[in-house]
Amino acid sequence: MIDEPLNKLEADILRALDDRRGRNNAIGRAELVRKINDMCPLFPVSERTIRKTIKHLVERHGEWIGSCRDGYFIIQTQEELTNACKYYHGYALSLLHVEARLRKVSLPALIGQLQIEFKT
């Protein structure tokens, strides 16, 4: 986590998600884009920019933002947190599998190499 102030878009996203606590209250991606752009209509932002900013909020600011097929929400329960972590874990393994295939090594061999890299 970083200790720096949020920029306007980051703060707007968190404000838009404030009443979207828990998976059952997720806001759809298109609706979130509309809501954000209504806050600052002179400088509209794309869905892609909002997705990247949400990723930044999670990775760098430690915000508990989850996503599901219904959209984005603030993680409230251990089950929601576990599901978010399962998604990222599966995604990470999938990317490592691709790297292993490209390098023509086994996944365990690649993971072993990563462990060595982290130790040094």
Image (cartoon, helix red, strand yellow):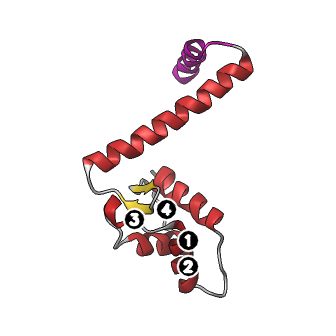
Q: Secondary structure at mark 1?
A: helix
According to the image, label 3 marks what residue?
26
Identify the main secondary structure in magenta: helix
Q: Are marks 3 and 2 in contact (CB under 8 Å)?
A: no
What residue lies at 32% left-to-right and 65% top-to-bottom? 21
- Report the Cα–Cα distance between label 1 and label 3: 12 Å
Residue type, numbered disc 4: Glu
Which numbered marker is on residue 4?
4
Image coordinates of residue 116 in percent, x first then y, are: 56, 16
Q: Which residue is mark 2?
A: 34
Relative vertical location of residue 59 with respect to residue 24 in this rendering, above or below: above
Q: Disc 1 designates what residue? A: 30
Identify the residue at horizontal 48%, vertical 40% (top origin): 88
From the image, which quarter does the C terminus lie in? Answer: top right
In whole angstroms, how far apart are the C-alphas of marks 3 and 4? 27 Å
Q: Please, what is the three-letter code of the amino acid marked with disc 1?
A: Ala
Give the structural element (helix, strand or loop) at label 2. Answer: helix
Sequence-first disc among 3 and 4: 4
User: Cα distance, mark 3 to mark 2?
Assistant: 15 Å
Query: What residue lies at 47% left-to-right and 54% top-to-bottom?
Result: 58
Q: Secondary structure at mark 3?
A: loop
**Residues at badges 1 and 2 in contact (C-beta under 8 Å)?**
yes
**Quarter of image, res 75:** bottom left
